[in-house]
Image (cartoon, rainbow, N blue to C red):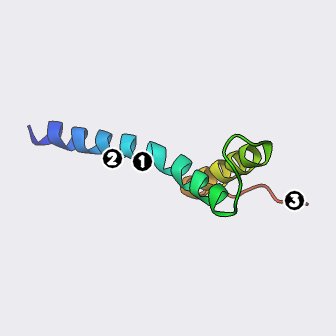
Amino acid sequence: MKQKLLIILATTFVLSSCGTIQSAAQADCTAVGLRVGTPEYDSCFKARVREREMDYSNTFLPSSK
């Protein structure tokens, strides 16, 4: 019973954090005045999601060299 509860809690935590990266990326892009649906917003959103995924995965972004 204890193991089942732990699995449920872990699954809930993982699934609840799925929207966090996207929500944070959206907040970043709208905070600088970009409007949802514009090409600039889409570019910003994709870049922020990628950066946050890299941050959370503990891997380094490729250098610009």
Q: Earlier in the sequence, mark 2 or mark 3?
A: 2
Q: Amino acid at mark 3?
A: Ser
Using a 10 Å C-alpha cutoff, classify the residue at mark 3 as few (fewer than 14 neighbours), some (14 to 19) or many (20 or more). Answer: few
Q: Which residue position is annotated with label 2? A: 13
Nearer mark to the viewer, of 3 and 1:
1
Q: Secondary structure under badge 3?
A: loop
Q: Amino acid at mark 1?
A: Ser
- Quadrant for the N terminus in the image: top left
Q: Amino acid at mark 2?
A: Phe
Cβ atoms under marks 2 and 3 closer than 8 Å: no
Residue 8 shows in this picture: yes
Q: Secondary structure under badge 2?
A: helix
- Where in the figure is residue 40, as x and y percent of width and height? 78, 48
Please give the name of the residue rendered at 91% of the width and 60% of the height, measured from the top-left corner. Answer: 65
Q: Which residue position is annotated with label 1? A: 17
Cβ atoms under marks 1 and 2 closer than 8 Å: yes
Nearest the eye: 59 or 47 = 47
Nearest the eye: 59 or 28 = 28
What's the CA distance linking mark 3 and mark 1?
30 Å
Please give the name of the residue rendered at 16% of the width and 36% of the height, measured from the top-left corner. Answer: 4
What's the CA distance linking mark 1 and mark 2?
6 Å
- Where in the figure is residue 53, as x and y percent of width and height? 59, 50
